[in-house]
Image (cartoon, rainbow, N blue to C red):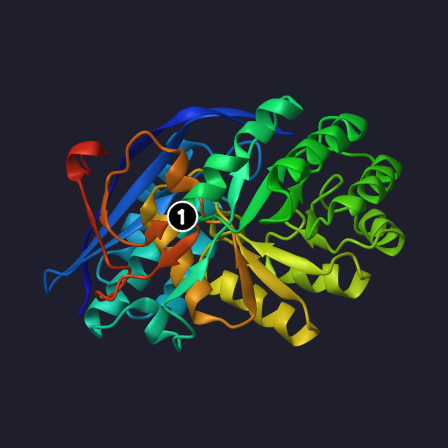
Amino acid sequence: MEIREVRAGYLNLELKEPFTIALGTVTEAKNVVVEIETDSGLVGFGEAAPMPIVTGDFQEATLQGILQFLRPLLLGKDPRQISMISSLMDKVLKGNPAAKVAVEMALFDLLGKIYRMPLYILWGGNANSFESDYTISIDEPDIMAEKVEPLLEKGYTALKVKVGQDGKEDVKRIAAVSRAVNGRALIRIDANQGWGIKEAVAAIQEMEKFDVELVEEPILKGNLDGMAFIRDRVKVPIMADETVFSPKDALEVIKAGAADLINIKLMKAGGLLAARKIDAIASTAGLECMVGCMIESRLSVTAAAHLVASSPNITRADLDAPGFLRSDPIIGGIEIKGGLCTLPEKPGLGIELNRQEVKFVDNT
């Protein structure tokens, strides 16, 4: 079996409303879709979600990275040899993790189709459903609080609240959200690197009275000493997100005692193989993981869901991106009802693509 063709195209996803975090505001995701076809006619799908403010990737660079550098590498290769192909991709294309994610995702989709089983089952199959939280972006405290009740009515049992613009104002935001929640859901806080060290300690200590479950990436990424300093002075568990891009980063966080949990995102890690390594390292050290996402369609969110469903150490999920989109080009895939995510039982990722919503680029 060998790869006969690789196609890639633009996937622009408009949001229902602006999504604001400490790093900036997003109104549209400019993503990329990949199709890998074998000589037997099987097709695997993958998605890249470049996010300049987090990963430094751009849509056009991602697309051209796939077509100009990765496509020639892939043609004629056995799609089942994913580890070998992943190593070769790192040699011909430095950085550009989203491009490699999309290709590797399509290969894993093919792998499941070749062996006729869902990907999470191929990886051992821990569960076929799990709960995801839903994110409330930064706004005025009363506006953020107004978003709580509709989410609880839909069945969400955990809310992720974005903060990080100003510690004192953020305490007001969490107070307002907490009053609206009234003990009916978990509250997770994500500062997206927005606070200073002392500001983080003061804000988190104030927020402890609101029964917060965790605080994610409170200060500038990579400041392991600062993260450890904060962790030693607050009661709320600290989660590393932007600080952990790779398995090596996860190991450094653990060695520094900088976090209690790790958030894995496929677009940061550079693929499902690396994401599974991060989870294995964290599990060995006794740290549980969350799997999150960028602004993505159900294609790559479904791939992330297969990762969640395959590992007992991944105890939390933040796979709410499909709920932000005006339209989604994916047929099938993960089913999301309220906070409950259920995996498809079809081979591979279990998705099909509405090709009318993707602008494929002519390889010739």
**For this rendering, which residue is in front, 34 or 228?**
228
Q: Could you say where residue 236 lies in the image, as x and y percent from the top left?
A: 77, 53
Could you tell whether 252 is left or right of 205 in the image? left
**For this rendering, which residue is in front, 331 or 53?**
331
Q: Residues within 10 Å of mark 1 (few under 14, many from 20)?
A: some
Q: Which residue is mark 1?
A: 338
Q: Could you say where residue 154 lies in the image, as x and y percent from the top left?
A: 41, 44
Could you tell whether 55 is left or right of 358 in the image? right
Picture layout, residue 136 above or below residue 301: above
**Residue 31 seen:** yes
Q: Could you say where residue 251 lies in the image, as x and y percent from the top left?
A: 69, 64
Could you tell whether 349 is left or right of 189 in the image? left
Could you tell whether 171 is left or right of 328 in the image? right
**For this rendering, which residue is in front, 287 or 83?**
287
Element assignment for label 1: loop
Which residue does the image show at 40% across and 78% down from the upper left? Answer: 124
How many numbered discs sit on the rendered protein?
1
Indicate the amino acid at tag 1. Gly
Which residue does the image show at 34% across and 60% down from the upper left? Answer: 342
Picture layout, residue 76 above or below residue 161: below
**Residue 361 seen:** no
Give the quarter of the image for residue 363: top left
Q: Quadrant of the N terminus?
A: bottom left
Give the quarter of the image for residue 48: top left
Q: Could you say where residue 165 lies in the image, as x and y percent from the top left?
A: 71, 26
Which residue does the image show at 33% across and 75% down from the upper left? Answer: 122
